[in-house]
Image: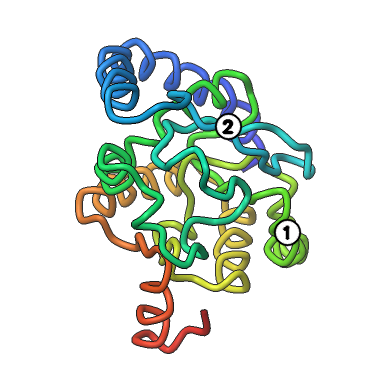
């Protein structure tokens, strides 16, 4: 684990650089689509918590109207459908809105695999992660919690999964999470927004 954690930042940077070289045409197409549909910036910046609880600004393609509350998780909005643009709905369903985080990885603020960066005001989640040391590693583009439930998980369970990852970081675990992430994205699993979160949680016996 120790040897891998030392070379992991190098692997992250190399893979992110290759991804940027391969995906830049899609960046342009998405940017044009966003500007064509609605006024406002192409990229959405939001304050998140990184390694050692240092703050940074995560980058995403803007998927919502500019008058949407900025620091509220989307699944907690009462009517997110009214806030999400048509282009944004497609981007969120396919997770293409997360692509600009390649830049966060190149800046050393994020890793490809790790706990998803919490909002600065998600105090309960941050407190739970402290119990498992999950705030002491770089947040990731995807992580073990996302594989096991994503928006459907309450903070306590998210933190436990993040803790499992923190204690078992390895190249094989990262590859497993990466492959499983692709499968989940293709199936659009675990994406729950607004009032739908309550019904999904009740169906699974999970408190919302």
Which quadrant: the N terminus? top right
Q: Earlier in the sequence, mark 2 or mark 1?
A: 2
Disc 2 to disc 1, C-alpha distance = 20 Å
Note whether 130 is above or below 30 in the view shown: below
Residue 23 locus on image (x, y percent): 30, 18
> Contact (CB < 8 A) between labels 2 and 1?
no
Tag 1's secondary structure?
A: helix
Location of residue 148 in the rendering, given as x and y in whole percent from the top left corner: 41, 65
Write down the residue under mark 1.
Answer: 126
Q: Residue at x 36, y 82 (%)?
A: 199
Of 122 and 148, nearer the camera is 122
User: Could you say which quadrant of the image residue 131 lies in?
Assistant: bottom right
Task: Tally the marks.
Answer: 2
Please tell me whether mark 2 sits on a helix, a strand or a loop: strand
Q: Percent x, y for residue 205?
A: 43, 89
Q: Considering depth in this image, is 120 or 136 the residue closer to the camera?
A: 120
Residue 4: x and y, percent? Answer: 58, 34
Residue that badge 2 annotates? 45
Instruction: Decide which of 26, 136 is in the foreground and name it.
Output: 26
């Amino acid at each position: 684990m120790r040897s891998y954690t030392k070379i992991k930042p190098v692997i992250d940077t190399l893979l992110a650089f290759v991804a940027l070289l391969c995906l830049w045409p899609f960046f342009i197409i998405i940017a044009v689509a966003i500007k064509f549909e609605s006024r406002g910036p192409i990229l959405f910046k939001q304050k998140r918590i990184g390694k050692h609880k240092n703050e940074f600004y995560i980058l995403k393609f803007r998927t919502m109207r500019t008058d949407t509350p900025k620091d509220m998780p989307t699944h907690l909005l009462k009517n997110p459908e009214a806030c999400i643009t048509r282009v944004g709905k497609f981007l969120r369903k396919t997770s293409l809105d997360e692509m600009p985080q390649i830049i966060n990885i190149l800046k050393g603020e994020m890793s490809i695999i790790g706990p998803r960066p919490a909002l600065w005001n998600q105090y309960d989640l941050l407190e739970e992660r402290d119990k498992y040391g999950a705030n002491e590693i770089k947040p990731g583009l995807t992580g073990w919690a996302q594989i096991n439930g994503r928006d459907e998980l309450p903070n306590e369970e998210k933190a436990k999964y993040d803790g499992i990852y923190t204690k078992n970081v390895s190249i094989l675990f990262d590859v497993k999470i990466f492959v499983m992430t692709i499968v989940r994205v293709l199936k659009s699993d675990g994406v729950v927004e607004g009032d739908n979160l309550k019904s999904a949680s009740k169906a699974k016996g999970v408190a919302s």
